[in-house]
Amino acid sequence: MPEKIAIIGAGLIGRAWAITFARGGRNVALYDSDPRRVEETLRTAADLIRDLESRAMLAGQTTAQVIGRITAAETIESALEGAQHAQENVPEDLEAKRIIFAELDKVAAPDTVLASSSSAILPSRFTESLASRHRCLVAHPINPPYLVPAVELVPASWTEPAILERTRALMSAIGQAPIVMRRELDGFIMNRLQGALLHEAFRLVAQGYATTEDIDAGICKGIGLRWAFMGPFETIDLNAPGGVRDYVARYEGLYRHIAKSQTEPTPWSGPLSERVEAELSRKTPRARLAERQQWRDRRLMALLRHLAQDEKEIGE
């Protein structure tokens, strides 16, 4: 019998997780306090799954097989009944997290793992008072997880190592790439790395060094090409004849000099965000954002297929 997963909250992230777990062979019970959102999510999930099937991204399964694993749960109790893992997806609000986790802890069976999709709130902040806080952690996806496999696993200081390992094994089994943090930290890993890049991108635009188009081109046509299949540490390991130590000896001084002008982040809001939006709108009018998001997802699908084929031919 496949593992049962409870998805609590049927918004964009809940829908994405439902697709990801169902494609990974798990039975999914989808619950939301608004039943209409569950109905809408089931409809849109079917369309997305068909899109995945048309691009051979269901691991040989059919749309009917995958969507058939996702069912609506009328109550939170029925969603959690028999679930080995519960994935919470309520809005990014501390009090909302505290309320829903208190309910999950009360209703879920003692061996059910309770995971939050929070992208920034530390797990200790909404699980501290729970009787079974040892089974709680953050499992933060990079959206959408059915296309971007990395998922950050963030424990509180009281999360049992066995729970962290069990969640890591589950994520690996459904095709995700778990990133296991040793302890919690504001912003986790992905947002801290992305934030550092964004701060510098906004600074360069604000100070008139480049346009948004030039900076985006520098990433997608430049360093981002390497980052599609290897990370920053392996990148520098291969960018000096003698590897990473050689790279550090050659370039640490340069980067230390640059870092002196990167200590104060430029405010993003106000006139700067208006300017950035105006530049971006020339490429994508605001009324076409959803269309462009669909384009992004299809490009991601094509890239993933290409990378998977290359791994077979060239090696990982």
Image (cartoon, rainbow, N blue to C red):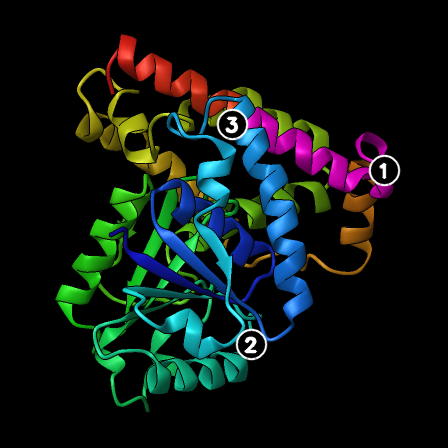
Q: Which residue bears the numbered disc 3?
A: 53
| Residue 276: mark | none
Q: Earlier in the sequence, mark 2 or mark 3?
A: 3
Residue 159 lies, in percent from the top left, at 21, 73
Q: Secondary structure at mark 2?
A: loop
Residue type at mark 2 is Asp
Let me know if residue 225 is in the magenta part.
no
Q: Earlier in the sequence, mark 3 or mark 1?
A: 3
Quarter in which the C terminus is drawn: top left
Residue type at mark 1 is Pro
Q: Quadrant of residue 175?
A: top left
Residue 307 lies, in percent from the top left, at 39, 19
Q: Which residue bears the numbered disc 2?
A: 93
Magenta residues, as a range? 281-300
Can residue 166 be seen?
Answer: yes
| Residue placed most toward the observer, 148 or 109 | 109
- In this rendering, the answer to whether 310 lies above or below 93 is above
Residue type at mark 3 is Glu
